[in-house]
């Protein structure tokens, strides 16, 4: 039997040990990581061609769901996390009758991922929520089900997969699992303000057929680079993607950040394509790492003020698919 593209991609995900039992416990906890923008984002020469490639970092959202609330209704804290509340309501409708409570439920989100910066904060909120509510109500939450639910809410990053993945964020579906990379650090700066992801994705993409073919070539090269663990090539492609994205979400600091990257011997510059962040990629296994990261942080601090250091996440190695 021939597998679909999405099924083949999921088959390449790293094994993570035995699954968590989906017990009816009354309380559930779920987590999800964020990203530092994207390694690559654009449009391919095909229908539903909008895609991105994730850059997972060690920033997390934790969701806790309890099957009771003071009001007897479903509630969320902080109050402004209304998308997570909507998702909790959708999952509650799927729960077995015995798991439904007349006393509502309380969802609490605790996150260290800044909002509106292109770091997948909303996606992490939703994925963590799906896992927490599912565990509390005894509703299995495999990635395919989470994708279907999230597609009814907003465009979403591929943070539900423990790998670097190519993901169709507008239709919310996995394209391919690329794998994992050696540890990197990102010396990040923020240009300020915020970007609404939903509004950003409504902007018509002014990409020509030649641009779309270029994105297809970049995706093929990035796929090979991740599987070959070629950080230098990954950095070059991330920088190219940042430059191509300037017409959609201009970063005034991109050229100065590229200059700093060259001066300190960085790999390249990654950006939040629908956000306000930029960062210099550095090989954390490089013997000169300490010198490079110190120089990059000092130069970026002089350029933009506040500087944040991010660590990328590594996952069990996957076989090429």
Image (cartoon, rainbow, N blue to C red):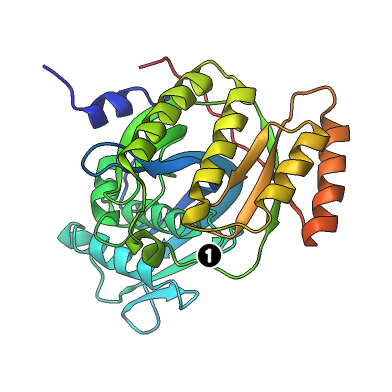
> What residue appears at the point 46 percent right and 54 percent down from the top-left corner?
124
Q: Where the C terminus falls, by quadrant? A: top left
Residue 144 position by quadrant: top left
Q: Secondary structure at mark 1?
A: loop
Q: Which residue is mark 1?
A: 116
Q: Where the N terminus falls, by quadrant? A: top left
Q: Residue 87 location, x and y as percent? A: 31, 63
The residue most toward the left is 1
Q: Is residue 157 left or right of residue 278?
A: left
Q: Residue 283 location, x and y as percent? A: 71, 28
Q: Residue 158 location, x and y as percent? A: 40, 43
Q: Is residue 34 left or right of residue 130?
A: right
Residue 46 position by quadrant: top left
Residue 235 position by quadrant: top right
Q: Is residue 266 visible?
A: yes
Q: Is residue 190 above or below residue 4?
A: below
Q: Nearer the viewer, residue 135 or 237?
A: 237
Q: Is residue 309 visible?
A: no
């Amino acid at each position: 039997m021939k597998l679909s593209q999405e099924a083949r991609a999921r088959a390449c995900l790293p094994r993570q040990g035995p699954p968590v039992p989906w017990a009816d416990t009354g309380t559930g906890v779920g987590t999800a990581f964020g990203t530092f923008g994207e390694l690559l984002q654009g449009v391919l020469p095909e229908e539903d061609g909008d895609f991105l490639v994730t850059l997972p970092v060690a920033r997390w959202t934790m969701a806790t769901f309890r099957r009771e609330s003071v009001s007897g209704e479903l509630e969320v804290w902080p109050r402004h996390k209304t998308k997570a509340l909507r998702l909790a309501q959708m999952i509650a409708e799927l729960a077995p009758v015995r798991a439904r409570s007349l006393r509502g439920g309380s969802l609490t989100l605790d996150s260290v991922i800044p909002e509106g910066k292109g770091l997948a904060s909303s996606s992490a909120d939703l994925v963590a929520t799906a896992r927490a509510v599912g565990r509390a109500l005894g509703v299995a939450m495999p990635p395919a089900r989470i994708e279907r639910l999230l597609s009814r809410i907003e465009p979403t990053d591929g943070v539900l997969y423990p790998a670097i993945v190519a993901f169709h964020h507008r239709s919310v579906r996995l394209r391919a699992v690329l794998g994992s990379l050696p540890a990197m650090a990102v010396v990040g700066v923020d240009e300020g303000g915020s970007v609404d992801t939903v509004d950003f994705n409504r902007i018509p993409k002014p990409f020509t057929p030649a641009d779309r073919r270029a994105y297809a070539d970049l995706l093929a090269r990035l796929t090979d680079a991740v599987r070959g663990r070629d950080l230098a090539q990954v950095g070059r492609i991330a920088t190219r993607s940042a430059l191509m994205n300037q017409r959609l979400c201009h970063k005034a600091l991109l050229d100065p950040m590229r200059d700093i990257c060259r001066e300190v011997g960085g790999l390249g510059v990654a950006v939040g394509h629908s956000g306000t962040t930029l960062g210099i990629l550095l090989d954390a296994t490089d013997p000169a790492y300490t010198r490079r990261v110190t120089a990059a942080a000092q130069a970026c601090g002089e350029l933009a003020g506040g500087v944040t250091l991010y660590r990328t996440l590594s996952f069990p190695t996957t076989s090429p698919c």
